[in-house]
Image (cartoon, helix red, strand yellow):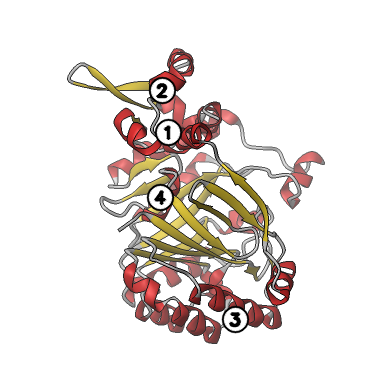
Amino acid sequence: MKERSLYIHIPFCRKKCRYCDFYSIEYQKDISFDYIDILCSQISNLKGSFSSIYIGGGTPSILDLILWKKLLMSLSDLAKKSQEFTVEVNPESLNRDKILLFRDRGVNRLSLGIQSFDNIKLKKLGRVHSQEEAVTKLILAKDNGFENISIDLIFGVWGQNFDIWEKELETAVNLPIKHISIYCLSYESGTPIFKQLKEKKIIPLDENLIIKMHNYNNKYLSKKGFMQYEVSNYAKKRYESMHNMNYWKNNEYLGLGPGAVSFIDGIRQRNVGDVRDYLSRVIKGEKVVVFREKLSPLKRAKESAALKIRTKEGIIFHWFKVQTGFDFMDIESKLIDELIQNGLIRYKIHRNTKIGIYLTSKGFLFSDTVSSSFL
């Protein structure tokens, strides 16, 4: 099967989290019914198949059950042909009826937005669920047929100490999960916590403590069977996210919904970023795409490098040649020397031959810097 992914954006939340800069609005039933109708119509016109399907947000699980039944019915044929079908869910809007519906309609992976197992930290982040509810809903999903469950966690929150983070990771690995995505808190412009930071109402965590937490993530999780396969992602063996790996390999993907991005046949395009505008354009028969660019072969090759270097495997020179048509060392040798000198990457050696490059421990800490250098 061709590695091509489908992403469907559900732009609704119960409440906007204080750190989030992704596009979403508070859940409104009248808009959501119109929106799902349009999504179903768009899905019915899709051609071909997708190796993975991912419904993200926002908070997809906030949708009413009747809307989920309609959306999943429209995806039934595609779901049968896909290998991985993920739905993002939040504890406060997940229940047994939705879990059973997901399971019976082809969803085989749940991504649970827990973010923290500490109630004080959850309140700081503006989450509307508790630690207890998160654990309860996760076990409910496991008990009702979901083997492949992923969770999201955030570290580096102001006022957090190392002992609390240790306890959170210990809680996580003792739950029935196969995948953990861990992100360091970032203060994004326009968010409430960014405003508090500027007003000096928040004192960011010391950088040395953040580095200590990051290094502990790798050491502790690997001992518990969760191997790091990308900068922010850890998984049990054979449970790496197929959908995410498709992005990091710079393969094709199609995005439906406001703000969603597509990359097909070397063309990247982005949809209008407002759900009401999105609905209005579809109803009027107007285009929802507001940005479109044709990537040159060299630019696509450089983007492939910038994405793939984030993975634990790194960039294998033969893979890069097959993927892009370019010899990696021909276009990046000077940069490689610089990154090696700075201790950010190393060569991968096989039988005394350089076959690729990969991030060092320091490189993982500064992965954004390394990745952007290829662009």
Return the mark for residue 345: 2
Name the residue at 44% across, 68% down: 47
For residue 299, say whether it is visible.
yes
> Disc 1 marks which amino acid?
Ile
> Disc 4 marks which amino acid?
Asn
Which residue bears the numbered disc 1? 309
Mark 3 neighbour class, 10 Å CA radius: few under 14, some 14 to 19, many 20 or more: some
What kind of element bears circle 4? Answer: helix
Q: In this view, does 204 lie above or below 330?
A: below
Distance Cα–Cα, label 2 vs label 3? 48 Å
317 on left or right of 130: left
Mark 1 neighbour class, 10 Å CA radius: few under 14, some 14 to 19, many 20 or more: many
- Of callouts 1 and 3, which one flags the residue occurring earlier in the amino acid sequence? 3
Is mark 1 in CB contact (under 8 Å) with mark 2?
Answer: yes
- Of callouts 2 and 4, which one flags the residue occurring earlier in the amino acid sequence? 4
Q: Looking at this view, is 37 or 149 the one in front?
A: 37
- Of callouts 1 and 2, which one flags the residue occurring earlier in the amino acid sequence? 1
Distance Cα–Cα, label 1 vs label 3? 39 Å
> Disc 3 marks which amino acid?
Asp
Image location of residue 307, percent across then percent down:
47, 38
Which residue bears the numbered disc 3? 37
- Of callouts 3 and 4, which one flags the residue occurring earlier in the amino acid sequence? 3
Q: Looking at this view, is 69 or 303 the one in front?
A: 303
Name the residue at 40% across, 41% down: 230
Distance Cα–Cα, label 2 vs label 4? 23 Å
Q: Which quadrant of the figure contains the N terminus?
A: bottom left
Tag nearer the camera, 1 or 2: 1
Mark 4 neighbour class, 10 Å CA radius: few under 14, some 14 to 19, many 20 or more: some
Tag nearer the camera, 1 or 3: 3
Return the mark for residue 246: 4
Is mark 2 in CB contact (under 8 Å) with mark 3?
Answer: no
